[in-house]
């Protein structure tokens, strides 16, 4: 028990879990351009119903936890730093790939989405080779 806990009777804030941070990352990208387009919403919803991290989860609870993560920062743009707390390397990679998928789902990538994805790549520790490979495959998915 720490000093604050002894005096105030409180526990230190628990770090957000990897699944909550994964949701936070997806929500950041979905709202990066200020508009949650129908295709981005559909992609996000599909991920929430198919990914193992969310299959048996209480979505409302996870959404509340993701919002708490965002509220720790003065801007949403700064809240991308929270993704650095993802402990699992596979979840880090998954977060980057899903964010890229959400960005590409709208059909056109704007400067804010491009900048956010580059920031995510850096914070998540995704090497250039994996980032390029993922984007090439996803570009094929959305090619007309």
Image: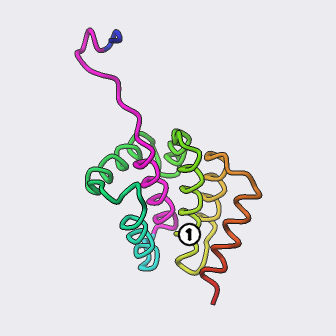
Under tag 1, what secondary structure? Answer: helix
Name the one closer to the observer, 75 or 52: 52
Q: Where is residue 28 in the image (x, y as percent from the top left)?
A: 48, 58
Q: Where is residue 100 in the image (x, y as percent from the top left)?
A: 59, 65
> How many labels sit on residues?
1
Q: What residue is shown at x 46% (from left), y 64% (from top)?
A: 31
Q: Does residue 100 appear left or right of residue 31 in this picture? A: right
Q: Quadrant of residue 72?
A: top left
Q: Does residue 133 appear left or right of residue 120 in this picture? A: right
Asked if the stretch drawn in magenta spans residue 29, the answer is yes
Residue bearing the label numbered 1:
101
Q: Quadrant of residue 36?
A: bottom left
Q: What residue is shown at x 52% (from left), y 51% (from top)?
A: 77
Locate the N terminus and report the quarter of the image it occupies. top left
Is residue 28 depicted above or below 14 in this figure? below
What is the magenta range?
5-34
Seen from this angle, which residue lies furthest bottom?
144
Seen from this angle, which residue lies furthest left?
9
């Amino acid at each position: 028990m720490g000093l604050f806990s002894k005096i105030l009777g409180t526990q230190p804030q628990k770090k957000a879990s990897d699944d909550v941070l994964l949701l936070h990352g997806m929500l950041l990208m979905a709202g990066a351009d200020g508009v949650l387009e129908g295709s981005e919403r559909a992609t996000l919803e599909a991920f929430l119903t198919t990914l193992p991290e969310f299959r048996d989860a209480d979505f409302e609870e996870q959404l509340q936890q993701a919002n708490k993560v965002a509220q720790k920062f003065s801007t949403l743009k700064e809240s991308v730093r929270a993704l650095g707390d993802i402990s699992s390397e596979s979840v880090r990679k998954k977060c980057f790939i899903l964010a890229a998928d959400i960005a590409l789902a709208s059909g056109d990538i704007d400067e804010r989405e491009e900048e956010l994805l580059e920031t995510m790549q850096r914070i998540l520790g995704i090497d250039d080779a994996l980032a390029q490979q993922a984007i090439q495959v996803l570009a094929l998915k959305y090619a007309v």
